[in-house]
Image (cartoon, rainbow, N blue to C red):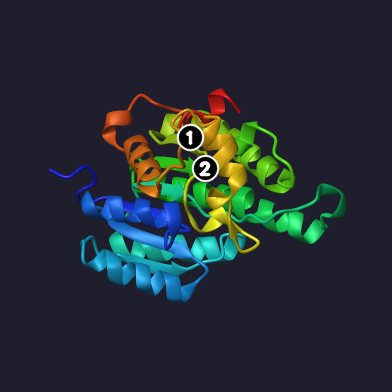
Amino acid sequence: MKRFEDRTVIVTGGATGIGFATAKLFAAEGARVVIAGRNAANGAQAVERLKKIGGRPLFVRTDISNEDDVRRMIDAAVAHTGRIDVLVNNAAMFYESDFLNETTERWRAVFDTIVNGSYWCSKYVANAMIASSTHGAIVNVSSINGYRALNQSSHYNAAKGALDQLTRCTALELAMHGIRVNGVAPGFIETELSVVGGVNELETDWFKNYYVGMRKIPQARAGHVDEVAEVIAFLASDAASYIQGTTIPVDGGLSTTF
C-alpha cells in the first residue's frame, strides 16, 4: 500500500520548485493533493501534471498572507476531499535587501508570507484535523538561514527563524491532539529562488569556488528539489511517528561548516 493512500495533503506554494516536487511525490504515494498558490496559471499547469499521476489534485488560488484567503482555501480543501491529513507550509518569498534601506512594507510582506501565512494555515488546518478526529502532520519548510546570518537577507532570515520557533511551539501545543509538527531546513537547492536579479547564484564563480571548490558544502554541490521533498514526505509519514518539534537540515552538510 502507498504511504499516503486516501490521505489529503495541502502544499502551499505547491505549483513550482520544492513545493511542486513535494506535491508530485505525495500524489505518487496515493495522496489527494491540494495546491495553494497565488499564480493561477502555474497552479493550473501543476494540476494538469499531477492528473497524470493521480490523486484528484486541486488548485486553490490563495494569498496566504491574507487570513480570509487561507480560510477559504481550507474550506475548499475539506469540501473537495472531506478531510485534511497533512499540511506542508512551503510558500515563501525572497529578494535581496540592504537592511539600512529596507522599507517597512517589504519587510512586512516577507513576514506576512513566511510567518503569518504559516501561522494561519497551521491554525485552521489543525482545527479542521481536530474537528474530524484526524491525527495529522504539519511540515514547515524553513531554511538553514533561520539560524545563520547572511548579507542582504535580514528579512528572510528573521522570518525563517520565527518559523522555526512556530514549529517548536505548535509541536508542543498540538501534540495532545495527535498532530505532529516538524520542519525541514534546506540549504542551496536549485529552484526559481536561485535566480536573484536575473542571475542564477548556483552558476556564479562565487558559488563554484567557495561552496563547491573549497567544499564549504561537504557534498560539493547544490541540492535537488526531490531530495527535500523526500524528507518532507518522511516527516509526514507514519515512519516519523515519534518525531515531534524538530527541524531537519537538508543542505549537503553546509550547516556544519557555515
Residue carrying label 2: 188
Image marks 1 and 2: residues in contact by CB distance under 8 Å: yes
Residue 156 versus residue 245 in the image, above or below: below
Q: Quadrant of residue 231?
A: top left
Residue carrying label 1: 251
Total labels drawn: 2
Q: Position of residue 54 (x, y in %)?
A: 20, 62
Q: Residue furthest bottom?
A: 41
Q: Residues within 10 Å of mark 1 (few under 14, many from 20)?
A: many
Q: Is residue 167 visible?
A: no
Element type where label 1 sits in the image: loop
Tell me what residue is drawn at x 63 percent, y 51 percent.
Answer: 116
Answer left or right for 213 relative to 9: right
Image quarter (top left, top right, bottom left or bottom right) of the N terminus: top left
Mark 1–mark 2 Cα distance, whole angstroms, equals 7 Å
Specify which label sits upstream in the sequence, 1 or 2: 2
Element type where label 2 sits in the image: loop
